[in-house]
Image (cartoon, grey):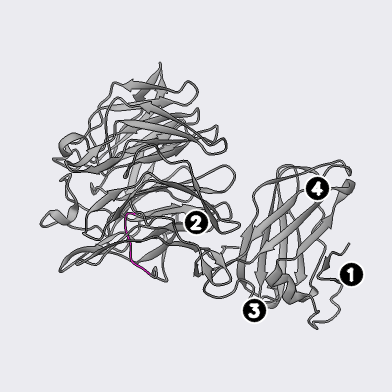
Amino acid sequence: MGRSINGWTSPVRRGSRQGRARSPGWKTWVVALGLVSGCGPREARYEAELLPQACSGTPALDGVSYLRFRVTGAGMEPVERYVPLDRGTAELPAVPSGPGRVLEVRGYTDLPRAGGRVVALGRSHPFDVPESADASHPKVRVALRRVGEYVRPGRSKVCVGLSEPRAGHTATLLEDGRVLLAGGFQVDSRGNDATLSSAELFDPVTGTLEQVQGLGSPRAFHTATRLPDGKVLLAGGEVQSVEGSLPVGHARVLDVARGTSTEVALKAARSHHGAAVDASGRVLLVGGVGAGGAVVSEAEGYDSSTGQVFSVSTPVPRVGMGVMPVRGGQRIAVVGGSDGTELRPEVLFFSYEGGSFVPVGEDARLREPRRDAALVPFGGPERLLYVGGHDSPDASRPEDVLGVRFLPTSEVVSPGDASQVTAGPQVFARSELCAVALPDGRVMTLGGLQFTASGPVSDPHVELLVPGTDGGSTALLGLKPLEQARHQHTCTVLEDGSVLIVGGLDDNGVRRTTLGDLVIYTPVPLD
C-alpha cells in the first residue's frame, strides 16, 4: 500500500524497476521526513519515520539512489527490501508479529551488485509488532546519518549543544536509547575548575537535549553504572572547594524514567576510581583517589536488588586502572593501574560469593604495566584490549611528572580459566584516551593526551582497530581526526552503532577550554 506525502501518492511497484525519473515527492520525503508504511503476515503492520538529521556536514541522503530496509528479530529470518529513493514512498518488508524487531535503513549510491556503496545508515530502537489486526501498529523512528563523517546533531543548520560545557563527566546509555550526561567540571574565566551538579538527556533519534533532575550535589570524575532495572548508580567523584579537590563519599541512584533520585552512603570517599556491574546487578567499586590525594585501598560493593552497600575484604589500592565485567558478567576484571608508588602488573578477577566480592582464578600479569589506559572488549566479550596509557606510577596528573612516557602499545587480556595476556597492536601514543567496542567487535580510540616538547596537550587522533580472523593480526586504520582535540571527554556507542562524543577539555599547553559540543560518528559497516 502507498502513503500520501504532501498529497502525492506513489503506488507500490513489484518486480522490475520502472525507470529512474525523479518523482515529485522525493525531496519532500528527504526534507519533511515523510512516513513509509508496510503490511506483513496476519496484517502485522508498522510505520517508519526517517529522520536524516544533522546540522552540518554532508546531508545524509546526498547521492543516495537506493534505501535498503532490513528487519531482524528473535524467532524470524531477516527480511530486507531495496527501494529507489526517487520512488517517494514504498512498502516496507513484511514482518511476522513478535517482540524485539529492529529496522535498519541503509542508503546506497547504487545497488550493491552494481558496485553501490553505503553512505548513510540508521537503526531503530527495538519495537514489537502486534499479531492482532485491531491493535495499534508501532511507529518506528530511524535517524539516518552519513557514514565515515563527524556530524553535529540538530536540524536546519541549528546545532545542539550542552546546556553547560563539561569535562570529567559521565555518559550512560539508557534502556530507551537515550544518553544520560551527568556532572563533570568546567574551567571558568579565571582558569579555575568549577564542579557541576547538572544532568541532561540526549535523544540520538531526535537530536535533542533536555534537562533532568540534578545530582543533588556537584561531582566530577565519578562513575556511572547502569543497573539491570534501568536505573543508574552515580558513585563517588570529587568536588572543587576553597580547600582544593575533595572526594565524594556518597552515591546517587537515578531513576530517569520516574524522575526520582536516592542517595546512598559509601564506605569510602573516592574519585578517579573504577566500577563495574555483574550479571546479577551487584556493583564493585575499587581504588581511586581519597582525602589528601592518597590512593584508596578499600573496595566495596553495591547490591541493586536491596539498595545496600557491603564491604569487600580484599584491598585493591589502584588508581588509573580499568574495570570491566567478563565471562557474561560472572566475573569482574581489574586491569593495570598504580598503587601510587609503583605500577601494578597484576590482572585481578572478582566474583560474588558468600555475600561479597572475592578474588578468583589465577592472576595474569601485564607485559608492560601502565595506568590511565583504556580497557574495552575486543573482538567479542571474551577478550579485553588495554590500550595506551603512560608509565608514571605517581598519583598526580602525568603532566606534573618529569620523564613520563606515553605508551604506543596495547595488550590483550583473555580472561579464561587460565588467563593470558598477549601483545596487542601498536597505536598512537597517548593517555586518558576514550575507547569503545563497536557491535561488530571493532574498537575505536578517540582523543586523549599526547606528549609534546612543551608537555602533554589534548589529542585529536582517532583509530579503528579491526581484530584479525582465525589468529590473524589486527588491522589498524587511522580515521579522520576529531575537529577539536580533547581529553576527559566521553564516547558512547549508541543503539545504531554510531559513536557519540561529548564535551571534554581542550588543553593546548597554554589554555584550557571546556567543550560543550556533541559529535556523532557512524563507522562504515563491515558487510
Q: Can residue 181 be seen in this view?
A: no
Q: How far apart are marks 1 and 3 (CA)?
A: 24 Å
In this figure, which residue is indicated by the disc labeled 1? 11
Q: How far apart are marks 4 and 3 (CA)?
A: 32 Å
Q: What residue type is labelled 4?
A: His
Residue at image coords 59%, 44% = 176
Q: Distance between the residues labelled 4 and 1?
A: 21 Å
- Say whether disc 4 or disc 1 marks the residue closer to the N-terminus: 1
- Give the image quarter of residue 476: bottom left
- Say whether disc 1 or disc 3 marks the residue closer to the N-terminus: 1
Residue interval drawn in magenta = 484-488
Which quadrant does the C terminus fall into?
bottom right
Q: Which mark is residue 63?
A: 3
Q: Is residue 483 visible?
A: yes
Query: Helix, strand or loop at disc 4?
Result: loop
- Say whether disc 1 or disc 2 marks the residue closer to the N-terminus: 1
Q: Which amino acid does label 2 sit on?
A: Thr
Q: Do the residues labelled 3 and 2 touch (CB within 8 Å)?
A: no
Query: Helix, strand or loop at disc 1?
Result: loop
Whether 507 is drawn above or below 170: the answer is below
Q: Do the residues labelled 2 and 4 touch (CB within 8 Å)?
A: no
Q: Nearer the viewer, residue 381 or 58?
A: 58
Q: Distance between the residues labelled 2 and 4?
A: 42 Å
Residue mark closest to the camera, 1 vs 2: 1
Instruction: List x then y, in percent, for residue 83.
Output: 77, 69
Instruction: List x then y, in percent, for residue 158.
Output: 53, 69
- Say whether disc 3 or disc 2 marks the residue closer to the N-terminus: 3
Q: How far apart are marks 3 and 2 (CA)?
A: 33 Å
Whether 117 is drawn above or below 248: the answer is below
Q: Is the residue marked by circle 3 packed among few (<14), some (14-19), or many (20+) residues within 10 Å?
A: some
Residue mark closest to the camera, 2 vs 4: 4
Q: In this view, does 143 lie to the left or right of 380?
A: right
